[in-house]
Amino acid sequence: MLMKGSRPEEIIALTFTRAAAGEFYLDVLQRLQEAATNETKRRAICGVHPAGEPSPVDQNNPLVLKLEDYPPGAFAAKLRELVQASDRLLLSTLDSFFARLVNPFALELGLETSRPVTVPEQEAPALAEGAMRTMLAELEAEGQLDELGGQLNDYVDGEAAGNPTETLLEMVRSYHELLTLARDEATWGDPESIWPGASRPAWLDLDEKGAPDPADVACVVARLSTYPPSKSGETTRRDQLVAQFEDLARVGRIAELHAGKLAAFLERYAPVLEETRTEWGISYHKQEVRLDAAEVAAARRVVQALISLAVRTAVRRTKALHACLTGFERAYDAEVRRKGRLSFADYAVLLNEWLSPLEQREDLAAALEDIHFRLDAKVKHWLLDEFPAGAAGGLGGGVGGHPFPPRCEGEALAARRISGHEHTAVRCAAAEPR
């Protein structure tokens, strides 16, 4: 891009570590120097093998250089230009770049300081604990601790929470960042959002709190009890088959079950969910027990009731999670974020809050021009290092849908891979445009 005419300050290259950010600059300097002084290196940069044959690169790629158009002197001139523009380069880590965005706009972002600082990762837990203490003190002063206790009870599904504060902190560690990306209460455990219109199965019961009908359980247990004994008369496997069904079918709360047991149960008995099925055989250790139409119907109602119980529990826990996290977010925002002590996720939160309204402005171009002026930059090319698994959502949800970087829509994404890895920002963006 430099050799094609792009100015150094028009290119931004972002990665996750300071070491990699430093390597960006040094590698470009080295390659320009080599191309200016070493004919073999110049030919290689232009995609030509030493034997004279073109290298296996896409010759239609607009970034491929034609050997005859770029003599050594062109690389030397570009090297000189790059060194002179070193103070205007945007080669940095993602959090450093976010800090560069935030610092000139502290007032617009509602910060109480004009010099926010990036919080080291190891300090983040202590800040979260401080915000948690603030939240609890405020709730106690307002007489709302009992309400918080009810929300915690819903979240743990009635199980005794050994240390409520630790339970809250675990919720924060696992889900606080998710809350900052989806604050709307209607997106948390709302059946109408999960099953819009009439898409919810008619049998999925989200209103009652009952367990499977004991009569249905007894009907299926009676049939499973006909499992044949071994040749020696042992009934161990019959007892196991009956117990595996009965223990789950008679459960009162999902918290009483291990998640793996519920999944295995539902997988085994999933065939009975087919409404047209009138008989079914369950195989266990090379033996089979066959259920007639009435028994299949009873098993179906048991499975449906267990699924309903699991979904009701998940909805209730999700609503409680949102309520607890919302209280924490208020305290954290006031005690940590607005005071300018910012984590990587906080930068994304602030930029989202600020940039989202920009999209609705009629003078968007003028607003962006002002941003570029105050940043002393006008970026045209974005180079993003490969994303670790799960990182794309954090970045994409933070700024991907806004002018930093430009909106990514299908083939319009103008990004180039700058490392040798296959899992790139381009692929992440293609999977989730925002």
Image (tube, rainbow, N blue to C red):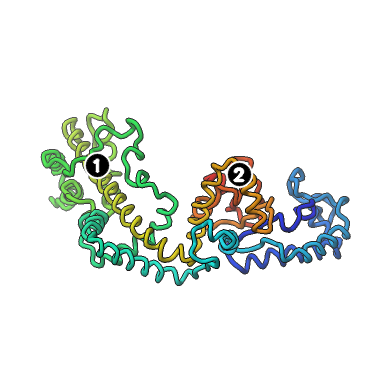
At label 2, counting other C-alpha atoms closer than 10 Å, the crowd grade (few under 14, some 14-19, many 20 or more) is some
Relative depth, front residue between 425 and 342:
342
* Residue 169 located left or right of residue 418: left
Q: Which residue is mark 1?
A: 308
Amino acid at the residue labelled 2: Leu
Relative depth, front residue between 25 and 138:
138
* Residue 108 located left or right of residue 88: left
**SS label for mark 1:** helix
Picture coordinates of residue 45, whole percent (x, y): 79, 56
Picture coordinates of residue 220, whole percent (x, y): 16, 40
Q: Residue at x 31, y 57 (%)?
A: 324
Picture coordinates of residue 116, whole percent (x, y): 53, 66
Spatial CA span between label 1 and label 2: 48 Å
Relative depth, front residue between 394 and 281:
394
Q: In the figure, 248 relative to 136: above or below? A: above
* Residue 226 located left or right of residue 47: left
Q: Which residue is mark 2?
A: 364
* Residue 23 located left or right of residue 349: right
Amino acid at the residue labelled 1: Ser
Q: Residue at x 54, y 50 (%)?
A: 355
- Can residue 231 be spotted in the picture? no
At label 1, counting other C-alpha atoms closer than 10 Å, the crowd grade (few under 14, some 14-19, many 20 or more) is many
Q: Residue at x 26, y 46 (%)?
A: 310
Relative depth, front residue between 63 and 332:
332
Give residue 147's quadrant in the image.
bottom left
- Can residue 180 be spotted in the picture? yes
Give residue 133's quadrant in the image.
bottom left
Q: Earlier in the sequence, mark 1 or mark 2?
A: 1
